[in-house]
Amino acid sequence: MTTIGVLMSSAHMDYSSHMIRGLCKRAKELGNVNLIFFPGMLGSDFCCERGEGVDAQESAVSIVDVFIISDQEMLHMLLEQPEGALFSNVLEHTPYILLKDDAGDVLERACALADRGRTKPDPEELFSEDEASRNTFERALEFAMTAHKGQVRKGSSIPYIVHPIETALIAMTLTRDQDLIIAALLHDIIEDTRYSAEDIEDAFGARIAQLVQHESEDKRIGQKPSETWKIRKQEFIDSLDNKSMDVKIIALSDKLSNMRATYEGCCKHGDEFWQRFNEKRKDMHKWYYRTVADKLREFENTDAWQELDSLIKKVFGE
């Protein structure tokens, strides 16, 4: 498995949809690529002194085999960081490549840089190569982008679509079932957008719609989210005892993506980070993620579960 970090400049976020489409399409075809997005980076993000999260950030990027850098300006910022600053010297030990017009071609060249002699799987083992199969994933990506248009991650300007896409990419490392991967991409549609399970079933079939439903919380519309947070999380935890392996794969992918964002947020903002959530007590988030990870321990031999476990320990000091 090759892990590629994508550093996206805030100055170029208007091109994020085009970038994401190209990278994800090619990652799907290759089948052995794990993408980690670092969206909305600013010059100030590179300038924290040691003691303000630098050690944690360096640990976060340590799993990246190759960086794709969105533009020349960001490359210059990375190369000019003084000793001890955030990301200083990172490009001395991690290969990188600049994003060009053909995002898919850039991803393939990035994979070549990271190649350690592993044999790429036959694409037919991951996805059928017929036109209908390819179109299904691409339609699902367009559907998700439309559904989540205008949404951002809590307390930030990062487009929300980055999360479901990352969830689908993580799921690709755990399964070759295309329905499962599409359900991972659509997992927040019912919960967080105006689209329903019926809309998903009409577009992608009953199995995908049912998988998405299993990932959707009862939001208890009309009640304060801060008052129902623990109830909703406990319901999810309890439900894992009776969930299928398919649903658990999506759950693991979702929670790993969220923990990556949580880790980045804590590194940048410290304890202030927790104020953006309905539940503002850090210890409650620790309870939730650790309990979920323990419930999913049957995946402990996978890279995804091990990364989730590692991030929980780093964020919460276990």
Image (cartoon, helix red, strand yellow):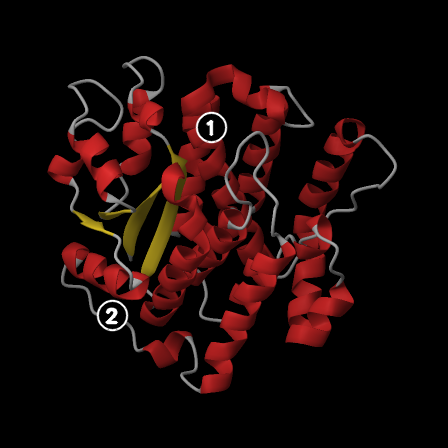
State how far apart marks 1 and 2 are (Cα): 34 Å
Residue 120 badge:
2
Residue 253 badge:
none
Q: Position of residue 257 (x, y in %)?
A: 48, 44
Q: Quadrant of the C terminus?
A: top left
Disc 1 packing (10 Å; few <14; some 14–19; many ≥20): some
Q: Amino acid at mark 1?
A: Gly
Residue drawn 47% across the image and 36% down it: 261
The mark nearer the N terminus, 1 or 2, is: 2
In depth, the one of 180 and 88 nearer the eye is 88
SS type, badge 2: loop
- Quarter-of-image position of residue 29: bottom left
Q: Quadrant of the N terminus?
A: bottom left
Q: Amino acid at mark 2?
A: Lys
Residue drawn 44% across the image and 31% down it: 263
Using the rendered image of the protein, determine whether residue 301 is visible from the camera's viewpoint.
Answer: no
Disc 2 packing (10 Å; few <14; some 14–19; many ≥20): few
Q: Dot 1 corresponds to which residue?
A: 265
Q: Position of residue 81 (x, y in %)?
A: 19, 24
Q: Position of residue 52 (x, y in %)?
A: 35, 15
